[in-house]
């Protein structure tokens, strides 16, 4: 993807999440659960001695609030590509920190600054996930950890299957498998990854579409166009014939720099 198309796509992602900011929380059940697990993993890794934390893709603040509760004395810099999401997170009275518009794939920092870098369900929007991970690890202080969740290949499997049954390809991105993600971590000695499945009780095709719109996940993969009305009706029919429900496969990663 060239720089021009990448910037255009990132702007579309920012706009889509900004438009969803005020109603995001009502649709974000799996996102809430994933953020809690990221915070719990981080607390197990670094229960104390944490001076500075960077959050990538704070959204409306699920993980931000969990960070604040666990490390109230740490300096927190919460970032998101969407100014609308940042405004929503910053409006919550339970969060104190610095809120900064930033593309997590191109962080506005250089050198080892952070004891923890945390992110929940944001890095799947990176153009180059491996390079983005490596860049973030470079911002860790000795003994620091990067802990994040991201979407896995098994996410929305039934929605993808409904498209395939109609001879079509879903617009949702092609997420990595757990094995593929582990390959990206091969150069980091102290690292691990695992996955969790989260059921999504969407109540049929209309419910799934409403969920995706509600969380702002509406920008299709590069080169894929939205379906026409008749194609969409065929996919919705196939999806509901297969049960009308779906789920998330969420991958969790921890990478630590040697002390």
Image (cartoon, rainbow, N blue to C red):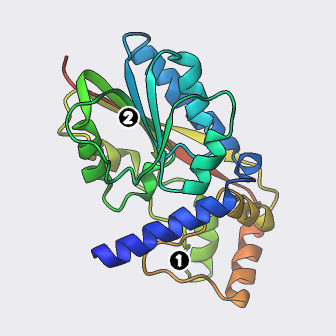
Quadrant of res 206: bottom right
- For label 1, the SS is loop
Q: Is residue 6 above or below residue 92?
A: below
Residue 5 place in picture, x, y as percent? 36, 77
Residue 22 place in picture, x, y as percent? 73, 53
Residue sitting at x 77%, y 76%: 237
Sort mark 2 into few (<14), some (14-19) or many (20+) by Cα contacts within 10 Å.
Answer: some
Residue 99 place in picture, x, y as percent? 50, 41
Q: Which residue is mark 2?
A: 193
- For label 2, the SS is strand
Check the image and name the residue furthest to the right. 203
Sort mark 1 into few (<14), some (14-19) or many (20+) by Cα contacts within 10 Å.
Answer: some
Residue 39 place in picture, x, y as percent? 52, 26
In the picture, the quarter occupied by the N terminus is bottom left
* Tag 1–tag 2 contact (CB < 8 Å): no
In the picture, the quarter occupied by the C terminus is top left
Q: Is residue 54 above or below residue 11?
A: above
Residue sitting at x 61%, y 40%: 90
Front residue of 50 and 28: 50
Q: CA distance from mark 1 to mark 2?
A: 28 Å
Residue sitting at x 73%, y 61%: 208
Front residue of 27 and 96: 96
Q: Which residue is mark 1?
A: 169
Check the image and name the residue furthest to the top. 48
- Indicate which disc, 1 or 2, sits on the residue closer to the N terminus: 1
Does residue 235 appear to the left or right of 164 in the view shown? Answer: right
Q: Which mark is residue 177?
A: none
Does residue 138 appear to the left or right of 253 in the view shown? Answer: left
Using the rendered image of the protein, determine whether residue 136 is visible from the camera's viewpoint: yes
Quadrant of res 83: bottom right
């Amino acid at each position: 993807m060239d720089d021009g198309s990448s910037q255009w796509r990132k702007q579309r992602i920012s706009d889509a999440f900004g438009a969803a900011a005020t109603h995001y929380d009502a649709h974000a059940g799996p996102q809430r659960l994933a953020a809690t697990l990221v915070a719990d993993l981080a607390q197990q890794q670094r229960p104390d001695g944490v001076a500075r934390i960077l959050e990538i893709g704070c959204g409306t603040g699920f993980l931000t609030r969990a960070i604040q509760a666990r490390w109230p004395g740490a300096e927190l810099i919460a970032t998101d590509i969407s100014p609308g999401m940042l405004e929503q997170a910053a409006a919550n009275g339970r969060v104190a920190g610095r809120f900064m518009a930033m593309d997590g794939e191109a962080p506005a920092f250089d050198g080892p600054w952070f004891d923890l870098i945390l992110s929940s369900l944001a890095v799947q929007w990176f153009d180059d996930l491996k390079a983005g991970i490596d860049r973030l690890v470079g911002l860790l202080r000795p003994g620091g950890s990067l802990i994040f969740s991201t979407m896995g290949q098994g996410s929305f499997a039934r929605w993808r299957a409904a498209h395939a049954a109609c001879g079509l390809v879903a617009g949702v991105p092609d997420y990595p498998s757990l094995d593929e993600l582990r390959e990206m971590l091969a150069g980091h000695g102290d690292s691990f990854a695992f996955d969790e499945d989260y059921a999504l009780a969407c109540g049929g095709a209309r419910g799934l579409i409403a969920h995706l719109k509600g969380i702002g996940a509406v920008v299709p993969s590069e080169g894929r166009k939205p379906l026409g009305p008749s194609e969409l009706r065929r996919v919705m029919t196939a999806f509901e014939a297969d049960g009308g429900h779906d789920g998330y496969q969420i991958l969790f990663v921890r990478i630590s720099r040697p002390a």
